[in-house]
Amino acid sequence: MAELKLDLPPDLLEVLKSLGDPQQTIKECVVLELYRRGEISSGKAAELLGMSRLEFIQYSGRLGIPFFRYSPEELEAELRDLEGLSKK
């Protein structure tokens, strides 16, 4: 595994320590942010964090990161499509 050295302000390091293992916390933050930005898939994020895809989806959802990302227009179109299917 590759290694990256970070210089962090002491206050930030203390906060990270209060959350548990600072290395794991930083890894989770980076993976979650990459997923939130759409840079990696939920499957890849789950793999990087050592959990199943379902576990990752539930975990990220608890943190307020949605699995489905629709614009209002996309959501409206999906709802119209579903309404059309239900009428058949």
Image (cartoon, helix red, strand yellow):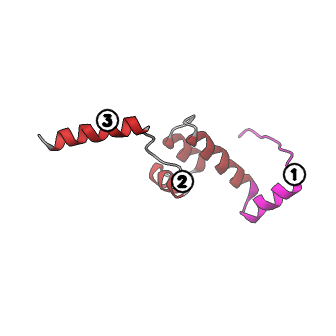
Q: Name the residue under label 3.
A: 77
Looking at the picture, which amino acid does disc 2 mark?
Answer: Gly
Mark 2 or mark 1: whose residue is earlier in sequence: 1
Mark 3 or mark 1, earlier in chain? 1
Q: Which amino acid does label 3 sit on?
A: Ala
List x then y, in percent, for residue 11. 85, 58
Q: Which of marks 2 and 1 is in front?
A: 2
Quick check: 5 left or right of 37?
right
Kindly indicate the quadrant of the structure image that contains residue 19.
bottom right
Q: Where is residue 59 in the image (x, y as percent from the top left)?
A: 52, 56
Vertical arrangement, residue 32 with respect to residue 25, above or below: above
Q: Which mark is residue 64?
A: 2
Between the C-alphas of marks 2 and 1, the distance is 27 Å
Residue 61, x across and y down, in percent: 50, 54
* Nearer to the camera, 2 or 41: 41
Q: Does dot 2 land on a helix, a strand or a loop?
A: loop
User: Which residue is rendered at x = 74% and y = 52% of the image?
Assistant: 23
Q: Where is residue 35 in the image (x, y as percent from the top left)?
A: 56, 41
Magenta stretch in the rendered image = 1-22
Q: Mark 1 is on which residue type? A: Pro
Instruction: Tell me if label 2 and label 1 are in contact, CB under 8 Å.
Output: no
* Mark identifier at residue 9: 1
